[in-house]
Image (cartoon, grey):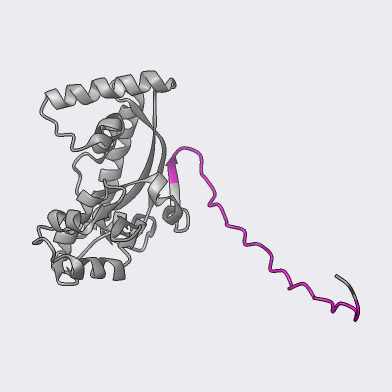
Amino acid sequence: MRIDPKGMIGDCPALLVRKALRYLRDCDRWEAGVMEAAAALAPGTGGALIKALRTEGLIEASGSGVWTITQAGQRFSAATAAKPITRATAERALSEFLERATQVNESPYFLAKVTRLVLFGSMLRPEVERLSDVDLAVELARKEADFERARLLNYQRAEELAAQGRRLRNFLEWEICGHLETFRFLKGRSRVIALAEYSIEKALVLTVPHRFLIGEPEPMAVDSKPARTQPAVRNRRPRGCPF
């Protein structure tokens, strides 16, 4: 996904909104004050931006005065504002990503492994020569089967990274440190790769043209709507019926 670097969301620059959503996507739910801090707005002035974000479908209410980011908001937060790239550049970036995925799965250093990798978006349209980015969705799973041992290894890695100066912002980042480290390594600071979590983007990815590069293809679950039943015919009680 590509956004216009000069675009606006309400009265806010699109790039500022993207930066704020990147911070907020790590929060399950948040109030207006948190969003104002993320967007560098003065306290009590975020009402217009919240309204604009909701209108664009980037956030949704999650209670009284509490908000959460939608799938569209997650995609917007990961969008690129870079200039379109050539197909050759995209193919080179994809090849380098696949090399990093192989390294993740083969190296004992990484605590997570790539179990699914899906390519989707404009790269699957051969008629498009100038691409916005390379859209990928990755599914990661822990390598250690034993939950308690996996958790211990994760905390040890978090302490190692913290000692090296890596900032872990909250409790969640400590809990999923190994997952985040693997995800960031795969992304590789590439401005060409738009990397999403498969578990989050699954509903979108499986309903658009896509290709599984790693892992077994997974069909999109179709919600079966209950059959519409005719209303029951109410028979009149015979006159004089005692019940």
Of residue 150 and residue 81, the one placed in the foreground of this image is 150
Q: Is 87 displayed left or right of 48 in the figure? A: right
Q: Give the main secondary structure, helix, strand or loop, of the magenta stretch.
A: loop
Answer with the quarter of the image where residue 150 lies.
top left
Q: In this view, does 176 lie above or below 16?
A: above
User: Can residue 201 be seen in the rendering of this structure?
Assistant: yes
Residue drawn at x 90%, y 79% as measured from the top left: 238
Q: In this view, does 195 lie above or below 3?
A: above
Q: Quadrant of the N terminus?
A: bottom left
Residue 144 in magenta stretch = no
Q: Is residue 3 above or below residue 142?
A: below
Residue drawn at x 72%, y 69% as measured from the top left: 229
Residue drawn at x 74%, y 72% as measured from the top left: 230
Residue 160 location (% of width, % of height): 18, 21
Residue 172 location (% of width, % of height): 28, 36
Residue drawn at x 23%, y 51% as measured from the top left: 24
Q: Give the range drawn in magenta.
A: 212-240
* Residue farthest toward the bottom in the current orientation of the protein: 239
Answer with the quarter of the image where residue 131 lies.
bottom left
